[in-house]
Amino acid sequence: MKSLCNREGMTTAFAMVGGVAPARSPKPILQNLKFVVDSSGSTLMATDLELGIRYQVSGVRVDEPGAAILPTARVQQLLRLSTEADLAIESDSEKVEIRGIRGKWHFAAEDPELFPEVPVFSSKNYYVLTSADLRKLIRRTSFATDTESTRYALGGVLVEFREDSVVMVGTDGRRLARMTVPARVHGEFEKPEGLSPVIPVKALKLLERNLSDDDTPVHLSIVDGNSALVRTERAVIYSRLVEGRFPRYQDVFPNHHEARVGIKAGELLRAVQQSMIVTSDESRGVEFGFAAGELTLTSKSTLGDSRLAVPIDYDDKPLSISFDPRYLVEALVVLDESVQVSIDLVNSRTAALFHTEDRYDYIVMPLTRDS
Amino acid sequence: MSRMGRIQKLPAAVVNQIAAGEVVERPASVVKELLENAVDSGARRIDLAVERGGKDVIRVADDGRGMDAEDLPLAFSAHATSKLQTAEDLERIVTLGFRGEALAAIAEISRTRCVTRTVDAETAIALEIEGGMHGEIKAAAGPPGTVVEVRDLFFNTPVRRRFLKSDTTEAGHVSEAFQRVVLASPNVHFTYRSGGKLVYDIPAQASMRERIGIFFGQDLAEDLIWVDSKVDEYRVYGFVAQPKHSRGSSRSQHFFVGGRYVRDRTLTHALTEAYRGLLMVGRQPVAFLTFEIPPDDLDVNVHPAKTEVRFRDSQKLYALLLSAVRHRFLGTDLHEKISAHGLGEALPAEPSNAGDVPNVPGTVSPVTAASEAGEPFALSGTVPDRQSVANWFQDRPAPSPHSAPFRGVPAPGPALPFGSGARNGSIPAPASWSMAATSAQPFQADVDEFAASPIPAAPSSGVPESAATAGETVSQDPAPPSPRTFRKAVQIHDSYLVVETDEGLSLVDQHALHERILFEELKLKIRDGGVESQRLLMPEVLELEPADHELALEHEATLAKLGLEVQDYGAPTLAVLSLPTLARHVGAGDLVRDLIDRFRHAQADPEPDAMLNLTLATIACKAAVKAGDPLTPEEIDALLAKATHFAHSHHCPHGRPSSLNFSKSDLEKRFGRT
């Protein structure tokens, strides 16, 4: 295999792909990346068998098609330190040579055939949504997951396919985030069977990094009920689904509310962040006191206490409820500052629902303090 | 031949045999009775010898008053005693024995020979009794005093004899009985031979600590903490052991009342409370404590063996013991010490055996230094709180209870040894200091004695300052006993911290320390109005063992108080509706199961407060950094800084030590620098 690669293109590809290669593995070849050059396009790939990525590298001149196994960390270092514009990457059965104008490096060769195949996107039926929307789905739900959970499949985000939309749900049992975006079916709409797929957070993070904030179409499909494939502009990402059952999340949505408040996301975020200053790991709660025209946030811990008043548009009966402010901040930072958030409340012991116009729902269970 | 069922009066011998069963259970009971008689006779030296664990021979020789020919046969008949005359005397018993039962009972079930001689008599006299049948009194040879020899115990009650255990076991019981009498009777020379071998030889002048050392080992003797406290006419003094010396049962708790070893649940419980959080679960503290109680307030005539007594005011005694021990712990460095040559540091001073510990029978309520000094804070009729005890420690002659003794004029007296460096340098040295303030680290402890009792800045009205309220827990003390300053610290093996301290070097178990800190923080929080609890969107459903399920529901209220709301989902399923935020590192299942486990192993009727502590310990344990967790320097600093805020940071809530200390001088010794 012989190629001349643009160093920057290669660096970008390494940044996207390198994270997937495990640092340690019982199958040592997985600690490397596989680089395939072909006249139809050059691909850099990595997998840990749970998660895989094929990334199209730009700026590669193919002199002789073939494949090479590149040691991830060392080549990454080389790419970072080198100042050359282009590097030649060549390999035979004995060694891999990376060569610039002023230097060359040899690495022991490994047989590219031994590298496990990373699936390609071959689905006929899939969902099409914009890159920006998929990114939004991920950003607004994946933070609410719980990778430690052993009882439920909470270590990922539940995906629900509808005829015209895709829904993602993430929860850790204390709060729940649900986002809906429009989507279009390519091919035939398959009524989902059995359990809804849950995509692991790790895959979503990788995916998020590969998504631009624009209208570029992205293809999403579930294969054989056990894995997800996503095709973006440059990459194909494969992930096994989280095994296990996702709880019946629909049950936790409050069916009525006693009070409703509207506030700008940015305003609420700043208020919560200010009130967090005196909370501690052990004493987390911030109390939200809703009264006519004013929201008062109070917090108290061994560090001290704070009190903050925010004018709001509120005319229901006074109500106070405590939250772990972290839960609110995590959701509010992924929203645009100007987004109007509505808060539906029942009482101090039941779930509060935060929702926006663009079909985002966030349910948080309150903190209580029995004394 | 009489028909069955006809009621008839039993012959005296049978009555005695039946009664004997109550007093004499095994050879050790005989040993106890004979030794106590010997002590009562005013002996200065008592020799005990047994063969085959006392089954064959028990021999007790004393050099006491002895008996004359008139008294001797009476001594062996029932309800004959020299120790009281009228029923009123029962109200104020000052001797160990008084019922006049023991010797008769023993004689009934053994072959007993008694040789005795009063000081005035020219010769000794001897009496032999076999199975209750008295022989003739004969002249014999012997020194002044009494020798009682009991052979073939239970020879005429074969059932009893069959129930005796092996020689070794019985000898063990004899040893225990011997130890209890020896510990209760200072100033008497005791020897004990078993099977011809000298087991113990306790000289009269051996102090309490030395006696403990002989019986239970030097290690323990060196780690004893002197306790002495008095409220009204009640006083407790003696030793409690450092928490690292714990036992699996309460047998090592020696309580002496009126020179008598007693067992008492109230006292055991008070002691356990005082050690709460310092011992691992299921371990019992070791203690040697003498109680002085006015004879009027005490009923020893509960059971022939007299190991049970009744107190008129057991609550007062409970509070006295609890506060005395707790207070000492506050002022004592309980950190584990590693010493250079296996020897402890300077041992705490203790009252010399002769004068200050008058627990010879007959002096149940001696006048103590403290009562001479007056008791400005004796809150008569109320439970003594920690503050009053603390005040007592620095007590000094005070004109009246209403004149705020320490804040005023410095009384004549030696200046404090640590001078102006101390927090309250102008405090006059207390009169009873040498007795009260004893600790492995005198200097440190001294400072803390004061720290434990905040001194008002300005004289105020005559009301005694009593900042702390009864029942307040130790951890809330504003000033920790060992304000160690940490200067440099590194983590090793991701598990331990090596810390430079003012005194030398500390090795800290990061998990144990963090656990203790979290535990104390939790306690504070609970006091400050409840634990914060995160409600769950979806209840966590747990499948439990049916017994566990029941236990969990039984303790539902305790769980709720901890922010753990559970609901019955139909046995054996339990739904968890909320979790304490502090336990967020702990899965609901783990937490609940662990707590249930603790509920199960708790005492028969656990106090809610104790259960709460157990629960907090569980949460703390789960939430604490584990051995193997790497810490950043900032985390290490934060951890160590917090440690100085809590009084019990030297032990994790389960009682494991959290740090080992090497003093600078230890290090110097080891490196041969001195």
Image: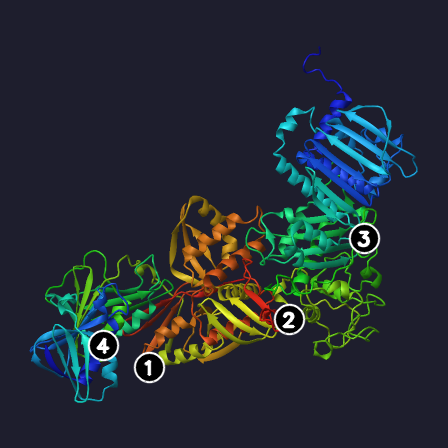
Q: Gap between marks 3 and 2, in whole Å?
A: 35 Å
Looking at the rendered structure, whether the residues under marks 1 and 4 are on a common chain is answered as yes
Q: Does B555 appear above or below B413?
A: above
Q: Residues within 10 Å of mark 3 (few under 14, many from 20)?
A: many
Q: Residues within 10 Å of mark 4 (few under 14, many from 20)?
A: many
Foreground of the two, B448 or B590: B448
Q: Quadrant of the N terminus of chain A?
A: bottom left
Q: Gap between marks 1 and 3, in whole Å?
A: 83 Å
Q: Which mark is nearer the camera, 2 or 1?
A: 2
Percent across and percent down for residue A302 are 54, 72
Residue position for label 1:
A338
Q: Gap between marks 1 and 4, in whole Å?
A: 32 Å
For the residues labelled 2 and 4, say whether their Cβ atoms are less than 8 Å apart.
Answer: no
Q: Residues within 10 Å of mark 2 (few under 14, many from 20)?
A: some
Q: Does A217 appear above or below B175?
A: below
Residue position for label 2:
B479
Type of amino acid at the residue the image marks with label 4: Met
Q: Which mark is nearer the camera, 1 or 4?
A: 4
How many marks can you see? 4
Residue position for label 4:
A16
Q: Which chain's residue wears label 1?
A: A
Foreground of the two, B8 or B244: B244
Query: Any mark on residue B358, and which?
Result: 3
For the residues labelled 1 and 3, say whether their Cβ atoms are less than 8 Å apart.
Answer: no
Q: Which mark is nearer the camera, 3 or 2?
A: 3
Query: Any mark on residue B654, and which?
Result: none
**Quadrant of the rendered image containing residue B581:** bottom left
Type of amino acid at the residue the image marks with label 1: Ser
Looking at the rendered structure, whether the residues under marks 1 and 3 are on a common chain is answered as no
For the residues labelled 3 and 2, say whether their Cβ atoms are less than 8 Å apart.
Answer: no
Looking at the rendered structure, whether the residues under marks 3 and 4 are on a common chain is answered as no
